[in-house]
Amino acid sequence: MYLTSRELALLADAFKLLADRTLPEDVLRLEVGRRLLDLLRADFLGSYVWDDAQRLFTNRVAINMSADNLGDYERYFQYRDPLTPRLQHRRTAVRVTDVVAHDELVQTELFNDFLRRDGLHWGMNLFAWDGDTNIGDLRIWRAAHRENFSDHELAMLDLIRPAFAAALARSRSEAALAKALAAGVAGEPAEGHPLARLTRREREVVTLAAEGLLDKEIAERLGISYTTVRTHLDRSFQKLGIGNRSRLARLLK
């Protein structure tokens, strides 16, 4: 695929953002969406996370769309949406017109009472998956005065898909870890729990190690030296009677 210097620069900026381990997932979705609007010469962004337990889309971020209109989508239209379920299960970026003809879409209640109210006309969506879990999406739209998205633009959106999915999965995992770590460190583990044999700092270190962080990453996260991390791990392994990270991860499941 040939990329112009402009496209290369904008894609590089997006990939740099997705490599930032400090950003919450809602910020990631918003900021990568902002960059993609620029890259794809698009006008509108809506982005949600699918809550499988409740069977609805939550955690909205958006650009150039009215809060009132999006509120109507969340309260009403998402339950009567003939389009999104057909897009959601695609594992690659997809144009709206690839799943429903535009002359068919413009006859729907979704288009006339939701999309058209904010000026959305041509759409392209990317749904990110972590295994069988839909962990976030990017719904990118153009106004009616523009043309539909090209094959080249579709390919550029799909180019970013693996990094986008990985960044969302990492952010979700690290948020869950931080919550679990805070809960585990805030009080003493129950008697008989493997972590009860360790000091507070050792619990912090092994919890991060069990989640797959490297020694250097643990040191950066906790603000301690690499050598101190190794010392805490060695002592913890001795106390727990294990010899490697794989055993640690199984022990703490």
Image: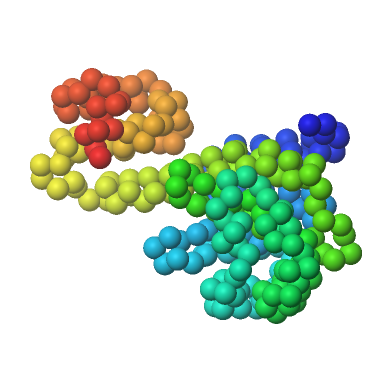
For residue 128, side relative to residue 115 (left or right): left
Quarter of the image that includes the C terminus: top left
Residue positioned 61% across, 68% down in the render: 82
Residue 245, image quadrant: top left
Residue positioned 56% across, 61% down in the render: 85
* Spot occupied by residue 191 in the image (x, y as percentages of width and height): 10, 45
Between 84 and 206, the residue placed more toward the observer is: 84
Q: Is residue 3 visible?
A: yes
Residue 54, image quadrant: bottom left
Between 46 and 61, the residue placed more toward the observer is: 46
For residue 109, side relative to residue 132 (left or right): right
Vertical position of residue 244 compared to residue 117: above or below: above
Q: How many marks?
A: 0
Between 65 and 77, the residue placed more toward the observer is: 77
Between 178 and 142, the residue placed more toward the observer is: 142
For residue 150, side relative to residue 177 (left or right): right
Residue 217, image quadrant: top left
For residue 107, side relative to residue 242 (left or right): right
Looking at the image, the residue that sits furthest to the right is 145
* Spot occupied by residue 250 in the image (x, y as percentages of width and height): 25, 33
Quarter of the image that includes the N terminus: top right
Residue positioned 57% across, 74% down in the render: 80
Q: Is residue 140 visible?
A: no
Q: How is the image coloured?
A: rainbow
* Spot occupied by residue 7 in the image (x, y as percentages of width and height): 81, 38
* Spot occupied by residue 99 in the image (x, y as percentages of width and height): 67, 57
Residue positioned 70% across, 61% down in the render: 100
